[in-house]
Image (spheres, helix red, strand yellow):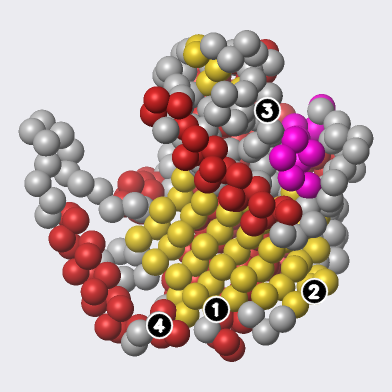
Amino acid sequence: MYKYQQLYDFSRNIFLKIGCSEAHASAAAEVLVSADLRGVDSHGVARLSGYVRLWEAKRINAQPNIRVVHETPSTAVVDGDGGLGLVVGPIAMQIAIEKAKNVGTGWVSVKNSNHYGIAGKHAMMALEHDMIGISMTNASPLVAPTFSTERLLGTNPIAVAIPAKNQPAFVADFATTTAANGKLEILQRKQQEAPLGWVQDKEGNPTTNANAAKEGGSLLPLGGDREHASHKGYALGAIVDIFSAVLSGANYGPWVPPFVAFLQPPSDPVGEGIGHFFGAMRVDAFRPAEEFKTHMDNWIGRFREAKTIPNQEKVLIPGDIEREMEAERLKNGWGLHEAVIKDLEALGEKWGVRL
C-alpha cells in the first residue's frame, strides 16, 4: 500500500529532476496524485513516466513562461508555452477565478499546453470561493464520430463543480466517450476484455478487444452507437474541442498532438499544443450564496431520497464515489498495479529518486 505523501514526494522529485521549479513541481505533483486519491488511477502516477518521456522528446517545456496573450474584464486566452498541463491548468483556472471575483464570471481558454490530468481537480478550485467551476480539455484523437471509422476527437472530458452548504459539493467529471482511454489501459494491464460499446475495430465493427485502438480501431462517443444516442456523445466531444482549441488557437480534431512520446505530432498543425477551457461563476452574481447553497442542499437531499429499483444501490450524487474514495485512501493508502510499480521503480532508478 502507498500513502499520498509517498507518491506526492516521489512525483514532485521527478518533476524537479526534469527541471521544473519548486512551485511548478509541487503543483504538478498535487494535480497528478489527486487523480489516484479520487480513484481515477488511469490519470494519476501511472502517467508520470509519460510526462517524462514527452519532456525527453522535447515536447514539454519544464520552465514555461505561462502568460495571458489576450483578455477582457471577464475573459482571457492563456499561452501555456508548452508547459505541463498539470501546471498550466491551475494557473489558468486561478485567472478565471480572479476575473469572476471582479466581474461575476471568468472564462479562460488555453493554447500551447499538454495533458492536464483530471478535469475535476481544476473545476473544484472554484468551490472554496463560493463559485461554480467548469473545466474541459481536448485530447489525443482516439474517438470516431458516429458513423465514422476515422479518429477525429479525443475523450474530451467535462467537469462541473457546484458548492453546497452542509452537503458535499456536486462534482461531475466525465469523459464524452463511453469510457476514458485510461480505463482501456487498465484493462490492457489486466489482460481483460472491454465491454461492448467502448471501442470499435478499424472497420468500424463493435469489439471487446481492449487493444482495438492500438490496432487501428477507435474509442466510441458516449452512447456507444447510434441506437444508444452516440450522436449526443459526439456532439459533447465536439463542443469541448471547439471551446478548448478553436476558441484559443490550440490544435483541434485530428491535429491534436498524441500523449505518447513515440508518436510524432501531425506535421501540419492548425494551432499550438493542446487546449483547455475554464470557467468560474460567482454564485452571488445570480442570487445570495447562502440562499443558493441552502437550495443545493435541498436539491441533493431530495435526490438522495429517491426511490430505487429493487435490489439496486441508492441514488448517488456526482462526486460521491470520488469523495468517499479520497477519504478512504487518505486514511489507509492504496495499492498500485504491478506494471505501474515497475514503471515507477524504473523511473526512480533512472533519475535517482527512491519510490
The residues colored magenta run 251-262
Q: Quickly name the residue at label 2.
A: 70
Asked if residue 266 is positioned above or below residue 8 in the image, the reply reads above
Q: Count residues near mark 1 (Cα–Cα under 10 Å), then give few for <14, some for 14-19, many for 20+.
A: many
Q: Secondary structure at mark 3?
A: loop
Q: Residue at 67% of width from left, 42% of height from top?
A: 139
Residue position for label 3: 151
- In percent of width and height, residue 38 lies at 44, 48
**What residue is pinned by disc 1?**
105
The numbered mark at residue 286 is 4
Mark 2 to mark 1: distance in Å? 17 Å
Q: Quadrant of the N terminus?
A: top left
Q: Secondary structure at mark 2?
A: strand
Asked whether residue 278 appears in the rendered view, the answer is yes
Mark 4 or 1, nearer chain start: 1
Q: Pick whichever, 166 or 134, lies toward us.
A: 134
Label 2 is placed on what type of residue? His
**How far is the residue under mark 2 from the one under mark 3?**
32 Å
Say if the magenta span includes residue 170.
no
What's under tag 3, amino acid-wise? Arg
User: Which mark is first along the chain, 3 or 4?
Assistant: 3
Give the main secondary structure, helix, strand or loop, of the magenta stretch: loop
Q: Which of marks 2 and 4 precedes in the sequence?
A: 2
> Dot 4 lies on which element?
loop
Instruction: Pick whichever of labels 1 and 3 is earlier in the sequence.
Output: 1
Q: Is residue 255 magenta?
A: yes
